[in-house]
Amino acid sequence: MNDPRSGRLDPAFRTGDLGDGTYRNPVLTADWSDPDVVRVGEDYYLTASSFGRAPGLPLLHSRDLVNWTIVGHALDRLRPEAAFAAPRHDGGVWAPSLRHHDGRFRIFWGDPDHGIWQVDSPSVRGPWSEPVLVKAGRGLIDPCPLWDEATGEAFLVHAWAKSRSGVNNRLTGHRMSPDGSSVLDEGTTIVDADRIPGWFTLEGPKLYRHDGWFWILAPAGGVATGWQGAFRSRSFFGPYEERVVLRQGDTDVNGPHQGGWVRTQYGEDWFVHFQQRGAYGRLVHLQPMRWGTDGWPVLGAAGTPVAVHAKPDLPEQPRSAPATDDAFPGGRFGRQWQWTANPGAGWTTLHAGDGLWLPCRRAERIDDLRALPHLLTQRVPARAATVDVELRLDSETPGARAGLAVLGDAYSWIGLRREGDGSARLVHRFAPANADRERDAAYDRPAPGGTARLRIVLGRDARCRFAYDTGEGFRPVGEVFAATPWRWVGALLGLFAAAPPGTGPAGTAVFTSFRVGP
């Protein structure tokens, strides 16, 4: 339900907090892919993959591991900048690791086309340092550092992307400089899963020290069908012994893996991981964790995921979830939004009121939203929801258009288009996954005054129904659209404004009152 005092959505329909001392999984019902978590004092922080979107490296905060809010990003623009001037959904930030060492937050991530990067900051809210390339090379992914307090040594482990390097299913270890800015050797294969019967696609390592052992928690078997493994050795460079510590079993949580271990200030152990859910992307689950009598970690309910469980024994917190709604005060957008490429100057216009002013930027491929860099996106919620936004098209340029989209390998949008005779029309368009341009308008009608309220109703299995209101109440339009994922990511909600090639300004689209409700 909505809070009538604030107009903001009650987060209870998105949080995993059931309000009775228990929680349900997933605790984050959107695509916070490849999560990693760290505790600093009484605060918990989580980061996730952001691939080719900017800003990157989202940062979430919690005090109970169930209720989360987004507090910022650690990466304002992707590097090298020229590589991300256009959308690159399969590149950028892969599987980061978040750590706190020597009074600073540090995040390492792998870019499969460029190498392993690192940023650091004294505060999770920044300012964050300029990215440092720790190790250059293709196919280097999923890095995780460790500072061994017992010896003062620093180590780094990473996996490999076969699409870039030709190899995978192995983990490479390095000695690392104490400040994490570089590796000190060529690297050694410390786990070769080709030698472990039944193991394939080993990746996503997280490195820890516990009870005299070096521990690597790492998934294998693929994101949709795999499992979570644990490896331990008395020496960082091995040899390691392995065990499967979390698998689907008889649950509906397919491929439960890739995440991180965190210990609360009161000594409880917990594990966060993701589940691949098609168009919804990778949803974050929270599992209880304990150490067995044999010294190995036990995750979930004896190695299978829990659906409902008692919350961590931590101070009670108000229900919360990462923001979705936005009034765009002063023309600014909230932390939940990301561009599909590094942003350029003038992509938004600041002003004194509310509403997002997006210039109708001219583009060659105006009929393929997947190719537009100036497209503002946020994650599709993995629950039934209604998405509303108001739009005014302040453009007299023939062919200028703006709208609300559901984007993936296939996409569909509803919005306004300016015609050659000066009229504005409401259109609903669709692009299949195997096409490089949109189909002709599925629906076309006048939009008096160049204004409309736009709506997407998200149902089960990411099935989307579109509707509009041009002054006579909402009316449905077009066929049901089944949202699809993008490469490595779930479907995204998007706002855009664009115009055909030409010279000179092409006007502006004004979006107001963006809301996501039950």
Image (cartoon, rainbow, N blue to C red):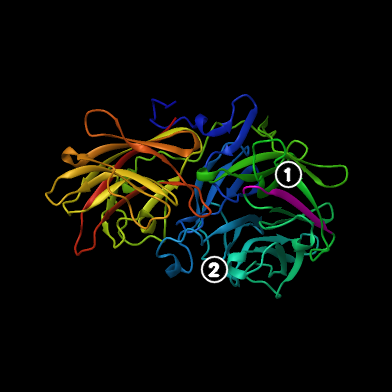
Which secondary structure dominates the residues rendered in magenta? strand
Query: Can see residue 373?
Result: no
Q: Which residues are magenta?
A: 224-233
Secondary structure under the numbered disc 1 in the rendered image: strand
Q: Is residue 293 left or right of residue 237?
A: right
Q: Is residue 162 left or right of residue 92?
A: right
In the rendered structure, which amino acid carries the disc numbered 1? Leu
Q: From the image, tell me which residue sits under label 1.
A: 246
**Looking at this rendering, what residue extends furthest in the left direction?**
421
Q: Quadrant of the N terminus?
A: top left
- For the residue pair 56 and 85, the one nearer the viewer reads as 85
Residue visible at 65% across and 28% down in the picture = 22
Secondary structure under the numbered disc 2 in the rendered image: loop
**Image-quadrant location for residue 303:** top right
Residue visible at 31% across and 37% down in the picture = 454
Residue visible at 54% across and 59% down in the picture = 93
Q: Which mark is residue 113?
A: 2
- Pinpoint residue 355: horizontal percent, then vertical percent: 30, 43
- For the residue pair 232 and 333, the one nearer the viewer reads as 232
